[in-house]
Image (spheres, grey):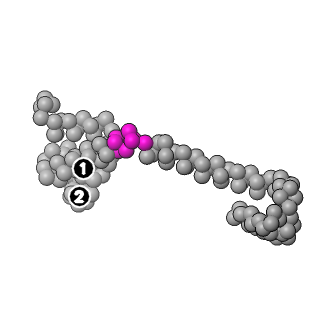
Amino acid sequence: MLVFKNGLLLKYYSSFQKDDKLHAQTRACSVPQIESLLIRKTPVLKRIQRAEARRELKRFLLQNLYQHPRVLRMTRKAEAVLADLYRVFRSQPALLPQAVRERTELETETRVIADYVAGMTDRFAMAEHRKLLDPHEPI
């Protein structure tokens, strides 16, 4: 962090590198002087630039990918499919494959069903959902 007052740099704080010489050199320096000090401290400058680039990338991804309406809509649909599958298997454990049902002797039924659903691929989960809940799907 750079602290300026009346065009002079009073302090330079770096969360990446504590360098007493840099702190001593940067007290009461003008902007051109601090720029030359930072350029000489390229590892610190590069880390600062990388950290800023990472923050900018995270901000961009959050706004344009993770919070995109289509992504949010698909996330809600996936959550609904998984919740439906869990509810069906919890209410009718006989629908589970035999090998999965046998695991209930070692673990709780809740854990076995959750593990089974969590281990499904997207395609398999969608097919199971259609098979179990879609009235138009052939048996």
Going by the image, does 128 lie left or right of 52?
left
Q: Earlier in the sequence, mark 1 or mark 2?
A: 1
Where is residue 24, by image quadrant?
bottom right
Outermost residue toward the front? Answer: 6
Q: Quadrant of the N terminus?
A: bottom right
Measured from the top left, where is residue 90 in percent x and y?
A: 17, 53
In this figure, which residue is indicated by the disc labeled 2?
A: 110
Q: At 60% from the left edge and 48% from the top edge, which residue is drawn?
A: 56
Q: Quadrant of the C terminus?
A: top left
Outermost residue toward the top? Answer: 138
Residue stretch rendered in magenta on the structure: 68-75
Q: Name the amino acid, label 1.
A: Ala
Q: Residues within 10 Å of mark 1 (few under 14, many from 20)?
A: few
Going by the image, does 11 lie left or right of 119?
right
Is residue 137 shown to the viewer in this render? yes
Is 72 inside the magenta-drawn segment? yes
Q: Considering depth in this image, is 25 or 21 the residue closer to the camera?
A: 25
Decide: is 33 above or below 81.
below
Measured from the top left, where is residue 4 in percent x and y?
A: 77, 65
Q: Residues within 10 Å of mark 2 (few under 14, many from 20)?
A: few
The residues tagged by marks 1 and 2 sit, at their Cα atoms, a distance apart of: 13 Å
Is 60 inside the magenta-drawn segment? no
Q: At 83% from the left edge and 55% from the top edge, which residue is drawn?
A: 35
For numbered disc 1, what is the local secondary structure? helix
Q: Any mark on residue 16, and which?
A: none
In this figure, which residue is indicated by the disc labeled 1?
A: 83
Q: At 27% from the left edge and 40% from the top edge, which residue is drawn?
A: 125
Going by the image, does 60 lie left or right of 66?
right
